[in-house]
Image (spheres, grey):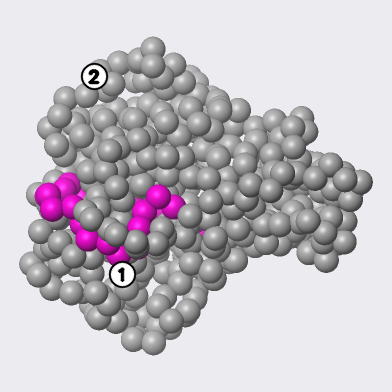
């Protein structure tokens, strides 16, 4: 859990805070709110690890507290290594496409099983490096202690002996599958099996035995063809993963290394009720997957454009054709408007809205930026308060990175609307929350 050590008020600590504050100010001026994880547009000055320890011998990486899931079910999780033998990949030891997925599920009896860590160690180092150092937030390397942060799920425990709807998740471009854990855990606590996917060669991925691939080294490609190819690859990944879930439900062990799957998993998968959601490019991929595969009955796009270049297009096929099954568009305050008379107009969302034949919703989360749809909204808040105390700079940097919405409210709103949407579309449970704006969540607006 989060490091409970109080912030020292010694002269060393105050000196460190001043140095880091100066670096963070430079990072903000340089454009630290860039769309890619941790890549600013210029190089701010920052203290290295040694300087951090010299300025404050009590320097420590920050462990984070994940928001408590709101559902009633205990949680389990496991990772599964998959090989798609229909897709060649000469760069992999198998010569074929390899993926890592995470299963998050309602748990049965779990005894003394340990809580899962937030990220495996090499992934944690890679994600930390994206936000620290020369091109990040002017923080010492190792500031984000993702590897020792604990989730609310226990490793490999049996699945609750009920049939559960299944939802797949695709992360943003370059983003690890782990940085939407707060959303994933909450859905699992409400009775869903949630399957998170790392898209090899794009998102950082750690395989059994410590083999690690860091993912794409550059920002999201400006070339529309590269975006189209990435969406096609993610779509193929999602369809393959669902194929493997069907094999699991049939009693097979699909793990490439023969690792045991959680007890009761096969009987717990209700694949007649399968949905998909994604963040950023993962939202585009979720919609495209539904276009190509009718097994997915409902989907959600969290702030992802549905075209290969947001300003110039071309539109994705799913934007032009729409879907015949329910789909939720859930955008931040500065993106994906369907009204050409408003700021941040996105032609792909407007076109999809007109073409959509299934149920549709278009929600806006006020006072947010795109990263507010990830765990970074509360990770940043906890990290900055640990380092800077109540320094007013926190307000500025949070606004630049994720917007001015309070992290706890933003997390709760996203959880409630995601759950309401999948409850209504997969479980056929009518949700009053989806009928119109609610006084319980004034920060959520129905855009259309």
Question: How many labels sit on residues?
Answer: 2
Residue 305 image label: none
SS at mark 1 in the image = strand
- Looking at the image, which residue is at 25% across and 32% down? 421
- Tell me, yes or no, whether the two marked residues, 2 and 1, touch with CB atoms within 8 Å: no
For label 1, the crowd category at 10 Å Cα-Cα, with few meaning under 14, some 14 to 19 and many 20 or more, is: many
SS at mark 2 in the image = helix
Earlier in the chain: of badge 2 and badge 1, it is 1
On screen, residue 67 versus residue 247, left or right, reads right
Percent x, y of residue 418 = 32, 35
Q: Is residue 227 above or below residue 371?
A: below
Tell me the residue that label 1 is attached to: 80
Q: Is residue 363 above or below residue 24?
A: above
Question: Does the rendering let one see residue 172?
Answer: no
Q: Examine the image and state in which quarter residue 142 appears.
A: bottom right
What segment is highlighted magenta in the picture? Answer: 151-176
Tell me the residue that label 2 is attached to: 432
- Looking at the image, which residue is at 36% across and 47% down? 184
- Looking at the image, which residue is at 23% across and 19% down? 432
């Amino acid at each position: 859990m989060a490091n409970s050590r109080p912030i020292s008020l010694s002269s060393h600590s105050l000196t460190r805070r001043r140095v880091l504050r100066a670096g963070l100010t430079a990072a903000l001026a340089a454009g630290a709110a860039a769309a890619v994880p941790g890549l600013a547009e210029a190089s701010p000055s920052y203290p290295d690890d040694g300087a951090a320890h010299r300025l404050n011998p009590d320097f420590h990486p920050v462990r984070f507290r994940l928001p408590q899931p709101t559902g009633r079910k205990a949680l389990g999780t496991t990772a599964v290594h998959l090989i798609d033998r229909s897709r060649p990949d000469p760069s992999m030891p198998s010569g074929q496409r390899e993926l890592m997925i995470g299963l998050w599920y309602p748990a049965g009896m779990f005894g003394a099983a340990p809580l899962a860590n937030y990220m495996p160690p090499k992934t944690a180092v890679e994600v930390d490096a994206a936000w620290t150092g020369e091109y990040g937030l002017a923080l010492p390397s190792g500031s984000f202690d993702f590897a020792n942060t604990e989730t609310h799920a226990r490793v490999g425990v049996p699945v609750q002996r009920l049939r559960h709807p299944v939802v797949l998740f695709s992360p943003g471009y370059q983003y690890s599958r782990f940085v939407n854990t707060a959303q994933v855990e909450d859905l699992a606590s409400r009775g869903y099996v949630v399957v998170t996917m790392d898209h090899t060669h794009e998102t950082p991925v750690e395989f059994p035995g410590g083999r690690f691939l860091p993912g794409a080294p550059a920002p999201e490609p400006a070339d529309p063809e590269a975006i189209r190819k990435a969406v096609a690859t993610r779509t193929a990944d999602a369809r393959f993963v669902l194929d493997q879930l069907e094999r699991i439900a049939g009693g097979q062990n699909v793990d490439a290394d023969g690792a045991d799957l959680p007890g009761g998993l096969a009987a717990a998968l209700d694949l007649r009720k399968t949905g998909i959601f994604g963040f950023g490019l993962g939202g585009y991929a979720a919609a495209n997957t539904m276009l190509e595969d009718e097994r997915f009955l409902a989907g959600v796009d969290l702030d992802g454009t549905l075209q290969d270049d947001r300003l110039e297009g071309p539109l994705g096929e799913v934007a032009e054709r729409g879907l015949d099954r329910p789909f939720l568009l859930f955008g931040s305050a500065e993106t994906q408007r369907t009204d050409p008379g408003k700021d941040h107009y996105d032609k792909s969302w407007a076109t999809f809205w007109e073409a959509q034949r299934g149920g549709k919703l278009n929600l806006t989360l006020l006072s947010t930026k795109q990263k507010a749809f990830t765990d970074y909204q509360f990770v940043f808040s906890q990290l900055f308060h640990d380092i800077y105390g109540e320094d007013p700079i926190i307000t500025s940097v949070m606004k630049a990175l994720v917007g001015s919405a309070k992290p706890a409210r933003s997390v709760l709103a996203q959880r409630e609307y995601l759950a309401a949407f999948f409850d209504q579309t997969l479980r056929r449970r009518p949700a009053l929350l989806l009928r119109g704006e609610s006084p319980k969540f004034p920060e959520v607006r129905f855009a259309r």
